Image: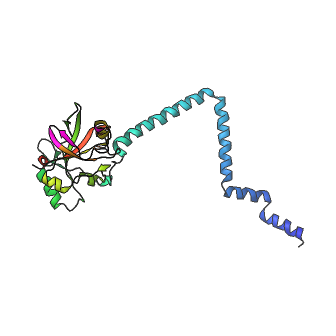
């Protein structure tokens, strides 16, 4: 064949340049995008013609999306949001069964047995009382704050360390040393964010404690109670072990 004859034969074999272009465009999904664009333009023209229907449809969509967003936000905050602690999905709260309340807190003796004989838990800690906190009075202020008595491994179990100072030690737990760790908010309000707060003496219900640390601003306990942690401090002293 001559060059021209070969060219025409090739075109006939391929089915024409226009068809090849269309097939190539379909393979690259360009045609789908063009069809979507045509549909959007057509839908826009129809909505412009029916302004009343457009307004009602937009309002219905806005209300539906807003309601769904609000419901999901509540469900996420109450049920879905993970606890802000290390390995939150592995944390377990242990209760004992009582005659009056099926979920009574465990006793100190039960805690010691669990801690010494447990093979299923990596760490075990305890905090006092039923809610973990009770209102107490600090010296030099009339504002009652919330405090909790915890064992020495409380913060290591949650995977958090003080922002300033240090955490409790097992020696302090055994000896009943009265030491206290402040929340970040209480440190700012009560001590003005003083950098030398570690080592100061603080009276809690007329009992002397030594400040050994300040928690980070992001730390919360209990995690699902808004702003409760702003007034927390954490202590350990010998009466907890008695």
Q: Position of residue 111 (x, y in %)?
A: 15, 53
In terms of depth relative to the viewer, which is nearer, 41 or 188?
188
| Magenta region, residue range | 191-208
Q: Along the horizontal axis of the image, is 89 left or right of 169?
A: right
In terms of depth relative to the viewer, which is nearer, 2 or 184?
184
In terms of depth relative to the viewer, which is nearer, 192 or 42?
192
Numbered disc total: 0
Q: Along the horizontal axis of the image, is 222 left or right of 10?
A: left
Residue under the point 78% across and 56% down: 18
Asked whether residue 162 appears in the rendered view, the answer is: no
Residue under the point 51% across and 33% down: 62
Asked whether residue 199 appears in the rendered view, the answer is: yes
| Residue furthest left as drawn | 242
The image quarter in which residue 146 lies: top left
**Residue 39: in magenta span:** no
Q: Is residue 169 above or below residue 12?
A: above
| Residue furthest top as drawn | 52
Q: Position of residue 1 (x, y in %)?
A: 88, 73
Q: Position of residue 2 (x, y in %)?
A: 90, 72
Residue under the point 26% across and 47% down: 198
Residue under the point 59% across and 29% down: 53
Q: How is the image coloured?
A: rainbow
Secondary structure mostly taken by the magenta-highlighted segment of the chain: loop
| Residue furthest bottom as drawn | 1
Q: Position of residue 89 (x, y in %)?
A: 32, 53
């Amino acid at each position: 064949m001559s060059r021209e004859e070969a060219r025409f034969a090739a075109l006939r074999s391929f089915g024409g340049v226009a068809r090849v272009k269309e097939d190539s465009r379909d393979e690259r999904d360009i045609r789908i995008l063009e069809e979507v664009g045509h549909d959007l333009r057509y839908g826009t023209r129809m909505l412009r013609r029916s302004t009343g229907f457009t307004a009602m449809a937009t309002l219905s969509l806005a209300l539906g999306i807003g309601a769904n967003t609000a419901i999901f936000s509540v469900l996420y905050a109450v049920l879905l949001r993970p606890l802000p602690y290390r390995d939150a999905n592995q944390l377990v709260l242990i209760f004992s069964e009582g005659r009056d309340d099926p979920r009574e807190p465990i006793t100190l003796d039960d805690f010691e047995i669990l801690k010494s004989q447990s093979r299923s838990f990596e760490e075990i800690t305890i905090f006092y009382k039923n809610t973990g906190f009770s209102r107490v009075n600090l010296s030099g202020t009339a504002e009652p704050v919330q405090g909790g008595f915890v064992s020495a491994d409380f913060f290591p179990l949650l995977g958090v360390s003080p922002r300033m100072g240090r955490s409790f030690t097992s020696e302090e737990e055994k000896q009943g040393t009265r030491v206290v760790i402040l929340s970040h908010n209480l440190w700012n309000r009560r001590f003005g964010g003083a950098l030398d707060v570690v080592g100061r003496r603080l009276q809690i219900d007329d009992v002397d404690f030594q400040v050994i640390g300040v928690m980070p601003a992001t730390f919360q306990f209990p995690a699902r109670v808004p702003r409760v942690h702003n007034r927390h401090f954490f202590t350990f002293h010998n009466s907890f072990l008695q």
